[in-house]
Image (cartoon, rainbow, N blue to C red):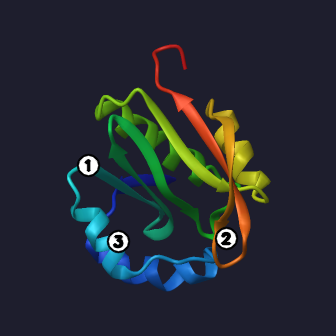
Amino acid sequence: MITVRAMEEADLDFIVEVEAALFSEPWSRRLYVNELRGEDRCYFAATQDGEFAGWAGLAVLAGEAHIMTIATLPAFQRRGVGRLLLAALIEAATAFQCDRMLLEVAATNTAAQALYRSAHFAPVGVRRNYYASTGDDALVMVRTLSEEQ
């Protein structure tokens, strides 16, 4: 069974180690520490039988929740980890009383885009050359937070 809990600084050694394998622009431990300590931030870790499966986080800026990161380790992909983490982020954004959520996702990452669409995110724009290391564009997606969704 997959469990989602608050991310802790003790998780960061592992996260930083695998981040480079998952992302073309990995975050540093220092950046994660600053994120975890922010009052307007919320980060989660997913585990299965004690094994780390993924993580996600959001920042609240001007009443909007921005998904900062969401990652599922390859061995746990297509098992619902991303969906559970995204649900935790949506719940946190609602608790922060945000009106909407937004994110950037690589224009080439169709699997992530499908996950976001299934959670009522819709594309609203493109950020050209968003990912400096690859030159890839990012699709901007938004979800309105309301009782109907």
SS of the residue under disc 3: helix
Measured as percent of width and height from the top left, residue 28 is found at 41, 81
Q: Which class describes the residues within 10 Å of circle 3: few (<14), some (14-19), or many (20+)?
A: some
Name the foreground residue: 40 vs 74.
40
* Residue that extends furthest to the front in the rendered view of this protein: 128
Amino acid type at mark 2: Pro
What residue do we see at 29% from left, 35% from top?
Answer: 96
SS of the residue under disc 2: helix
Measured as percent of width and height from the top left, residue 10 is found at 28, 76
Q: Quadrant of the C terminus?
A: top right
Disc with the residue nearer the chain's start (1 vs 2): 1
Can you identify the residue that label 3 sits on?
32
Marks 1 and 3 close (CB-CB < 8 Å): no
| Cα–Cα gap, marks 3 and 2 | 21 Å
Marks 1 and 2 close (CB-CB < 8 Å): no
Name the foreground residue: 77 vs 48.
77
Amino acid type at mark 1: Asp
Measured as percent of width and height from the top left, residue 5 is found at 35, 54
SS of the residue under disc 1: loop
Can you identify the residue that label 1 sits on?
40
Disc with the residue nearer the chain's start (1 vs 3): 3
Q: Quadrant of residue 25?
A: bottom right
Amino acid type at mark 3: Tyr
Can you identify the residue that label 2 sits on?
74
| Cα–Cα gap, marks 1 and 2 | 29 Å
| Cα–Cα gap, marks 1 and 3 | 14 Å
What residue do we see at 35% from left, 74% from top?
Answer: 31
